[in-house]
């Protein structure tokens, strides 16, 4: 009996040790996988992207493909408050308030700048030999003038040998934050941006949260800003979760990143799949502009501009509900039910031909994109047939 008990406890001890070893092995494997994923090739800008990014024509295209979904832009990010304000308005007053809301939305969608990584060379201001040995410690001098922008504040260092030079980037950032703190920024880099923790957040697909926090903690010209934003964009491209950033301030920089690195096919397919053909065509035009591809798109772009602007598309959604409820407009009801107007079908056909031309000449994922185009053509044909049938049934002979 004693022998059996000893044998039992010995086996139990071995079993527990094996379990512990397996758990350790699993943890090490998971950490190794995360480290390997985090250390994958990170795409970088090979030259200064600012001149192209700030180009007015490119900015206009980026704003258009971002879209203006007011329900997403003004969604609540905290616990809802149990207070609602009701107002009685005329149709004109409602449209005026709506236009002001659109302007507020455009401010919220203001894109963060894309600039080159700043050179961290400590430029020497002067060398004063008379001050050599004056002190055995360095002196750091920080400009704390009220109202000065953080980017314009100077931080200089006086070395023990009398040399006066600009402070290194990290030191300057820390001193500015110490004396003139920016709300939300930490003196030291938060742990969430460490490789393993960052990979965990990426696996949870908290892309907007990461990018919002990134803008608070880092300046756009810092190496860490470029490195982390690149990892986020590449992870989104792998998971195909582009819609998470649509109608946020990060969608434009993400699209520009894909265009710059010639990897737009997955985003283009997502736009085709969601029936955002105009955005798909604009993405291709961005690709042509950034890489100076000799394709003639001026006439096509002019036709797109004649159709609808970003504000018009937002106001169109408001007018649908107003007209159908106030005037009982059967034409608007048909367009609302189908989701497109006769003009939309015309523009879709133009966009389809433009996208097909890109797929044939430049796409890397031709088969996937061709299948997406074919499916959308079939869906559009059914919608157009239904639209024409309903219009004819209600005596609408000519619609535009």
Image (cartoon, rainbow, N blue to C red):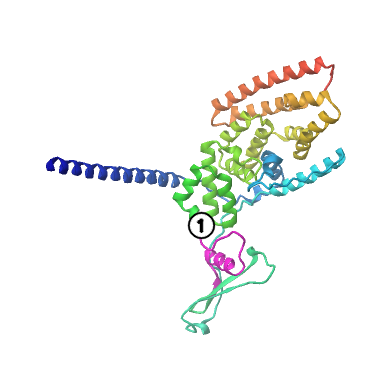
Name the residue rendered at 58%, 70% in the picture.
Answer: 155
Image-based side of 389 in relation to 260, left or right: right
**Which percent across, then down, holds residue 153?**
63, 68
Frontmost residue, 45 versus 114: 114
Name the residue rendered at 75%, 39% in the picture.
Answer: 310
Magenta highlight on residue 179: yes
**Which percent across, then down, holds residue 151?**
63, 63
Q: Is residue 221 visible?
A: no
Label 1 element class? loop
Image-based side of 137 in relation to 80, left or right: left
Magenta highlight on residue 392: no
Q: Quadrant of residue 66?
A: top right
Name the residue rendered at 53%, 67% in the picture.
Answer: 171
Position above or below: 194 against 237: below
**Which percent across, then down, holds residue 34?**
42, 45
Frontmost residue, 189 versus 49: 189
Label 1: which residue? 190
Region rendered in magenta: 164-190
Position above or below: 139 against 266: below
């Amino acid at each position: 009996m004693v022998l059996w008990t000893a044998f039992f406890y010995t086996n139990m001890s071995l079993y527990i040790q094996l379990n512990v070893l397996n758990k350790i092995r699993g943890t090490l494997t998971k950490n190794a996988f995360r480290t390997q994923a985090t250390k994958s090739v990170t795409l970088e800008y090979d030259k200064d992207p600012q001149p192209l990014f700030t180009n007015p024509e490119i900015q206009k295209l980026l704003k258009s493909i971002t879209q203006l979904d007011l329900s997403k832009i003004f969604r609540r990010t905290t616990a809802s408050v149990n207070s609602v304000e009701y107002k009685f308005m005329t149709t004109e007053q409602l449209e005026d308030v709506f236009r002001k809301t659109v302007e507020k939305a455009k401010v919220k969608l203001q894109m963060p700048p894309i600039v080159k990584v700043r050179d961290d060379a400590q430029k020497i201001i002067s060398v004063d030999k008379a001050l050599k040995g004056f002190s055995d410690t360095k002196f750091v001098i920080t400009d704390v003038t009220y109202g000065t922008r953080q980017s314009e504040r100077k931080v200089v260092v006086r070395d023990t040998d009398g040399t006066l030079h600009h402070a290194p980037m990290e030191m300057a950032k820390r001193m500015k934050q110490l004396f003139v703190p920016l709300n939300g920024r930490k003196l030291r880099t938060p742990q969430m941006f460490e490789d393993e923790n960052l990979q965990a957040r990426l696996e949870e697909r908290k892309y907007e949260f990461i990018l919002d926090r990134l803008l608070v903690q880092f300046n756009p010209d810092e190496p860490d800003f470029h490195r982390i934003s690149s990892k986020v964009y590449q992870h989104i491209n792998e998971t195909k979760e582009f819609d998470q950033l649509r109608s946020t301030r990060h969608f434009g920089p993400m699209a520009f990143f894909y265009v710059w690195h010639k990897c737009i096919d997955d985003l283009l397919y997502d736009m085709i799949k969601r029936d955002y053909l105009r955005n798909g065509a604009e993405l291709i035009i961005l690709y042509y502009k950034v890489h100076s591809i000799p394709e003639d798109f001026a006439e096509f772009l002019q036709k797109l501009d004649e159709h609808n602007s970003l504000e018009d598309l937002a106001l169109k959604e408001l007018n649908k509900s107003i007209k159908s409820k106030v005037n009982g407009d059967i034409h608007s009801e048909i367009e609302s039910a189908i989701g497109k107007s006769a003009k939309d079908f015309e523009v879709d056909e133009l966009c389809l031909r433009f996208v097909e031309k890109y797929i044939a000449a430049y796409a890397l994922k031709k088969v996937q994109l061709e299948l997406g185009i074919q499916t959308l053509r079939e869906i559009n044909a059914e919608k157009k047939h239904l639209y024409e049938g309903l219009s004819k049934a209600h005596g609408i002979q000519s619609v535009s």
